[in-house]
C-alpha cells in the first residue's frame, strides 16, 4: 500500500517512522511519503489560506493550492481521506475498508478547514473521497487524526503485524466485544493474584472465562456494542450473563 500525507506541518508526521509502521516503511511493506503543502503555493509568502466568503472567524485553506497538490499526488484508484470533525465516524470497520485501497492520500487541513470545492471537485471526477472524524472533539488540524487512522489501517495490511491472530482476538475485532483482561508473570504481585483459571491449564475453562470477562466488560463499558451484537454469534452461556 502507498500512503501520502499532505500537511503544512510535515514534522508532525515524524512518528510514522517509529515502531511497527516505521518498520513496515523501512522494509518496503508500506510506501510512505509526507509532503509539505506549501510546496504548491505560488506566491512568495507561500500562502495556503484566505478569509472565508460570507464572513466569520478564522481562515480557510485555498482550493487552488490543494488542487495542485492533490493532482500531483493522487494516482488512479486512490482513496482521498480528509480528516475533519464534521466527517463520518472512524471505526475499525472504516479502517478495514481503507486497508484494501492501493493508495491512501491524507489531506490534513488546518484553520477552519479546506475550501469545500476540493471535495466537490474530486467527487465529481470520480475519486473515492472520505471525510472522516476520529471522534466528537475538535483538534487543531488533521495531522493527529491522520496518525491515528494510518496506525489503525497499517496494522491491517498483510505483513505489518507479525502474528495475524492478534488481529482476530483484540477489541473491536470479529467478536464485536471488548478484549478480556490479560496477565503475565509474576503470578502474585503487590498482593494481587492472577485469576486461578488462567493457571489451571484447562483450555476450555480459560476460553469460557475470557468470553465471560469480555461480555461483562462490554456490558458495563459499551452497552451500545452489546445492542449491536448479532444474536447468532452468542451462545446460551453468554445470554445467562
Ligand atoms: N480535525 C480536527 N478535529 C478532528 C477530528 N475530531 N477528527 C478528524 N479530523 C479533525
Image (tube, rainbow, N blue to C red):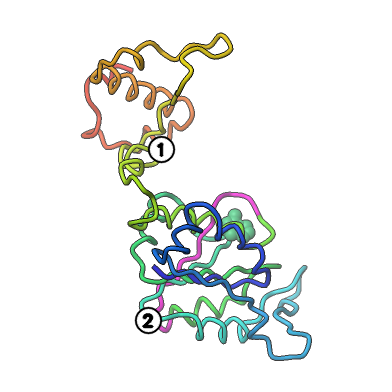
Identify whether 105 is placed above or below 65: above
Position of 167 compared to 91: left or right?
left
Q: CA distance from mark 2 to mark 1?
A: 34 Å
* Mark 1 secondary-structure assignment: loop
Mark 1 and mark 2 in contact (Cβ < 8 Å)?
A: no
**Which of the labelled discs sits on residue 171, or is there none?**
1
The residue that label 2 is drawn on is 76
Identify which residue, 177 or 225, lies in the foreground. 177
Seen as rendered, the residue at the extreme bottom is 43
User: Which quadrant would residue 224 be assigned to in this image?
Assistant: top left
Q: Earlier in the sequence, mark 2 or mark 1?
A: 2
Q: Position of residue 106 (x, y in %)?
A: 52, 68
User: Which quadrant contains ligand 1?
Assistant: bottom right
Q: Nearer the viewer, residue 162 or 88?
A: 162
Q: Is residue 80 above or below residue 97?
A: below
Which residues are the magenta region? 124-138
**From the image, which quarter does the N terminus lie in?**
bottom left
**Residue 165 place in picture, x, y as percent:** 30, 42
Q: Residue at x 67, y 76 (%)?
A: 61
Direction top: furthest residue: 191
Observer-nearest of 130 and 99: 99
Amino acid at each position: 500500500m502507498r500512503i501520502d500525507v499532505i500537511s503544512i506541518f510535515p514534522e508532525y508526521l515524524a512518528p510514522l517512522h517509529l515502531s511497527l509502521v516505521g518498520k513496515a516503511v523501512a522494509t518496503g511493506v508500506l510506501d510512505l511519503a509526507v509532503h509539505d503543502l506549501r510546496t504548491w503555493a505560488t506566491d512568495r509568502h507561500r500562502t495556503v489560506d484566505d478569509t472565508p466568503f460570507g464572513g466569520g472567524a478564522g481562515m480557510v485553506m485555498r482550493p487552488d493550492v490543494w488542487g495542485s497538490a492533490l493532482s500531483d499526488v493522487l494516482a488512479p484508484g486512490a482513496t482521498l481521506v480528509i480528516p475533519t470533525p464534521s466527517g463520518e465516524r472512524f471505526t475499525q470497520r472504516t479502517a478495514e475498508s481503507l486497508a484494501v485501497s492501493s493508495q491512501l492520500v491524507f489531506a490534513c487541513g488546518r484553520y477552519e478547514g479546506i475550501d469545500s470545492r476540493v471535495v466537490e471537485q474530486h467527487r465529481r471526477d470520480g475519486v473515492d473521497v472520505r471525510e472522516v472524524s476520529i471522534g466528537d472533539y475538535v483538534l487543531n488540524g488533521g495531522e493527529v487524526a491522520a496518525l491515528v487512522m494510518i496506525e489503525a489501517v497499517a496494522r491491517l495490511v498483510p505483513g505489518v503485524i507479525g502474528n495475524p491472530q492478534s488481529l482476530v482476538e483484540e477489541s473491536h475485532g470479529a467478536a464485536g466485544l471488548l478484549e478480556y483482561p490479560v496477565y503475565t508473570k509474576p503470578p502474585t504481585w503487590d498482593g494481587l493474584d492472577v485469576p486461578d483459571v488462567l493457571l489451571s491449564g484447562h483450555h476450555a475453562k480459560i476460553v469460557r472465562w475470557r468470553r465471560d470477562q469480555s461480555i461483562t466488560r462490554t456490558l458495563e463499558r459499551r452497552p451500545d456494542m452489546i445492542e449491536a451484537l448479532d444474536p447468532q454469534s452468542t451462545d446460551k452461556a453468554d445470554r445467562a450473563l
